[in-house]
Amino acid sequence: MRCDVKLLDLILPVRCVVCDALGEQLCPACRDALPRLCPPLCARCGKPTQWPVARCGECSGRRLAFASARAAVAYDDRVRRLVRGWKERGLRTLAAAAADAVASALPAPGATALTFVPADRARGLERGHHPAERLARELGERWSLPVQPLLTRTRPAARQRGLSLADRRRNVTGAFAPAREARTPPRVCLVDDVYTSGATVSAAATALRKGGAHRVEVVTFARAVR
């Protein structure tokens, strides 16, 4: 078996998705250099700020269904390459690296269960896996919390990438519903891979609250910082 592994490494060498160095899908140097998000942060949406604020300019005046959102790293070019390898190239073990980053940066949420933004059916079939669910299950192991599929998609939605903020909101409005056979606990942590505008997780949190959740916390691996 070891000879077969060595032969496979010669034919298909493993390279870091960030720097292309041989050895691991995420090399130790790139893992250590991930741009961690540090306080002060907006108490509501988790955006980095110059000083602690309850609501920042990005989320002030918006109706957000979640109580708070937190991410481990900023979504820069390095993290973009990592996420692309994880989501689009099917490098599923990167979910463990993402979960390690989240668990080391953020305290366990004050929730009784984790759930995840459900995959669009077509994109899920195309990828062959669901990154948000995989991240949630990895975090469930690290935080000793159960992971429950509490949401379903009500309809297909266009990709959010490239849409304006207003179009992002319209694109996901009503796109989620509580899972019919699930009992939603009062305190839930919603997991997704990347927080860009907050439109997707807010729409998903709205559905969780319709299902019975009183408080929804959002946790993502990365966050776009404007």
Image (spheres, rainbow, N blue to C red):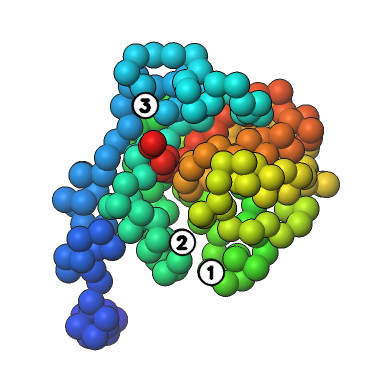
Residues marked 2 and 3 touching at CB (< 8 Å): no
Q: Amino acid at mark 2?
A: Lys
Rendered location of residue 136, percent (x, y): 53, 46
Q: Is residue 34 visible?
A: yes
Q: Is residue 134 visible?
A: no
Q: State which quarter of the image contains the C terminus.
A: top left
Q: Mark 3 or mark 1, which has the lower sequence index?
A: 3
Residue depicted at x 79% and y 33%: 210
Q: Which residue is mark 3?
A: 48
Q: Which residue is mark 1?
A: 127
Q: Which residue is mark 2?
A: 87
Q: Secondary structure at mark 1?
A: helix
Q: Secondary structure at mark 3?
A: loop
What is the spatial separation of the Cα atoms under label 2 and label 3, in whole angstroms? 25 Å
Residues marked 2 and 1 touching at CB (< 8 Å): yes
Rendered location of residue 49, percent (x, y): 36, 22
Residue 70, placed above or below residue 30? above
- Nearer to us of marks 3 and 1 is 3
Instruction: Tell me how many marks there are.
Output: 3
Rendered location of residue 199, percent (x, y): 60, 40
Q: Mark 2 or mark 3, which has the lower sequence index?
A: 3
Residue depicted at x 52% and y 55%: 161
Front one among 126 and 5? 126
